[in-house]
């Protein structure tokens, strides 16, 4: 079975760039202006082009807001890079990626899920640490503010 392009980009490619190549990722992306967005869009399009036959949903067209990012200062010299992802369509798709910048980066994804009992959509905060995926629970809304507050509380 082929992997999904958006899942691969968010949960494997970008995760590995952040957690395994932080110095290089930070050097290449953490610059003034819209450099993060341009860099991520370029990487997404390159993976999409090279992997035409390797992925499902390989026809995703990016919008103006996809991969838009904002750096939000936190306390103690830390910050969050909050990245808008393409609109989630399937369980496991992310709505946002949040990278906590500090001594060691942390990588979070707000993922779309469905309740088993009624199939209603809900969003789960998940963290990747090393190659392990941790579900940290359901957020009551899919708002950026709730996501940021939840990450601050960890």
Image: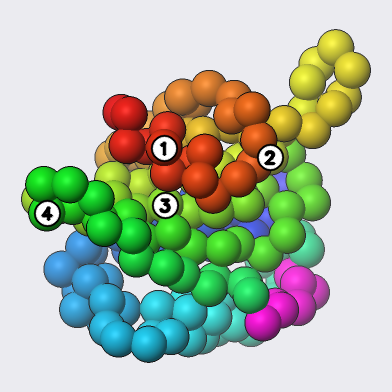
* Extent of the magenta region: 58-64
Q: Secondary structure at mark 1?
A: helix
Q: Earlier in the sequence, mark 1 or mark 2?
A: 2
- Residue 147, horizontal then vertical, whole percent: 49, 41
Q: Earlier in the sequence, mark 3 or mark 2?
A: 3
Question: According to the image, label 4 marks what residue?
Answer: 77
Mark 3 → mark 2, Cα distance in angstroms: 15 Å
Q: Secondary structure at mark 4?
A: loop
For the residue carrying disc 3, how many other residues have a C-alpha within 10 Å: few (<14), some (14-19), or many (20+)? many
Residue 2: name its quadrant: bottom right
Q: Earlier in the sequence, mark 3 or mark 4?
A: 4
11 up-or-down from 124: above or below: below
- Do tag 1 and tag 4 residues touch (Cβ < 8 Å)? no
Name above or below for residue 77 compared with residue 142.
Answer: below
Tell me what residue is drawn at x 32 percent, y 37 percent: 152
Measure the alpha-carbon separation of dots 1 and 4: 17 Å
- Dominant secondary structure of the residues highlighted in magenta in the image: loop
Q: Nearer the viewer, mark 4 or mark 2?
A: 4
Nearest the viewer among 57 and 86 is 86
Query: In this view, which residue lies farthest toward the top?
Result: 117
Q: CA distance from mark 1 to mark 3?
A: 12 Å
SS category of the residue bearing label 3: strand
Going from the N terminus, do you reach mark 1 or mark 3 first? 3
Residue picked out by circle 1: 149
């Amino acid at each position: 079975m082929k992997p999904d392009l958006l899942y691969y980009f968010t949960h494997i490619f970008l995760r590995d760039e952040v957690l395994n190549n932080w110095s290089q990722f930070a050097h290449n992306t953490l610059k003034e202006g819209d450099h993060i967005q341009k860099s991520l869009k370029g990487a997404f399009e390159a993976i999409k082009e090279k992997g035409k036959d390797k992925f499902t949903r390989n026809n995703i067209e990016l919008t103006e807001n996809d991969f838009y990012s904002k750096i939000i200062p936190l306390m103690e010299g830390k910050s969050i890079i909050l990245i808008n992802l393409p609109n989630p369509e399937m369980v496991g798709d992310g709505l946002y990626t949040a990278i906590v910048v500090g001594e060691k980066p942390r990588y979070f994804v707000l993922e779309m899920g469905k309740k088993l009992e009624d199939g209603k959509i809900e969003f789960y905060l998940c963290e990747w640490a090393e190659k392990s995926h941790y579900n940290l629970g359901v957020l009551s809304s899919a708002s950026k503010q709730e996501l940021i507050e939840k990450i601050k509380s960890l």
